Image: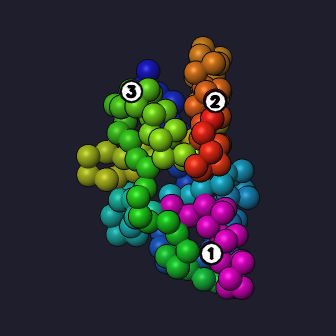
Amino acid sequence: MKAKEIMTPDPVTVTPSDTIARAAELMQSYGIGMVPVIDGAAKQRVEGVITDRDITVRCVAEHHGTDCHVADHMTSAKLATVRPDDDISAVMDKMEREQVRRVLVVDERGMLAGVIAQADLATKLGPKEPARVEHVLERISAPRGIPVA
């Protein structure tokens, strides 16, 4: 199975100049916890992600207003990405190794193709390989530095 077979294609996105309030509204409307941040000009080149945790820890906890821009609080370093034709085993290994609940699927130019979330693993791969998915989800969720048996 390939990444493109389980990814959510054409995910909702924001630009660095959008407000935190806009990102939060999208998360609420779509029931998601992360929105890819794309370049406003290229329209799909990935610049980062904004997560519900980014908003909570970097904006709200620091007493910033919701009119802040996404660029002020997004994660842009060390993004977890895979290619559409990557094998799902490589995707799961990356999620486990980097302990991330979501990975961006990008093409060779860095253009956004989709997103794979742990929920995609659970719903699309879980019925076929429940033990494998359970293992990966357990490792993703383990506190850093604490080994999982």
Give the distance between the C-alpha atoms of the residues marked 3 and 1, in whole angstroms.
34 Å
Q: Residue at x 61, y 61 (%)?
A: 51
Give the distance between the C-alpha atoms of the residues marked 2 and 1, in whole angstroms.
33 Å
Task: Tell me if mark 3 has few (under 14), some (14-19) or many (20+) residues whose alpha carbon lies within 10 angstroms of its own.
Answer: some
Q: Quadrant of residue 148?
A: top right
Q: Residue at x 60, y 83 (%)?
A: 68
**Residue receiving disc 2:** 149
x, y percentage for residue 94?
44, 39
Specify whether residue 43 is painted magenta: no
Left or right: where 18 falls relative to 108? right
x, y percentage for residue 48?
45, 63
x, y percentage for residue 49?
51, 61
Q: Quadrant of residue 140?
A: top right
Q: Earlier in the sequence, mark 2 or mark 1?
A: 1
Report whether residue 82 is seen.
yes
SS at mark 3? loop
Q: Quadrant of residue 130?
A: top right
**Kind of residue sitting beneath label 3:** Asp
The tag on residue 115 is none
Q: Which residues are magenta?
A: 49-64
x, y percentage for residue 75?
50, 66
- Depicted 65 relative to depicted 129: above or below: below
**Kind of residue sitting beneath label 2:** Ala
**Residue receiving disc 3:** 87
Left or right: where 59 falls relative to 79? right
**Residue receiving disc 1:** 58
**Which is more toward the observer, 14 or 1?**
1
**Which is more toward the observer, 140 or 17?**
140
SS at mark 2? loop
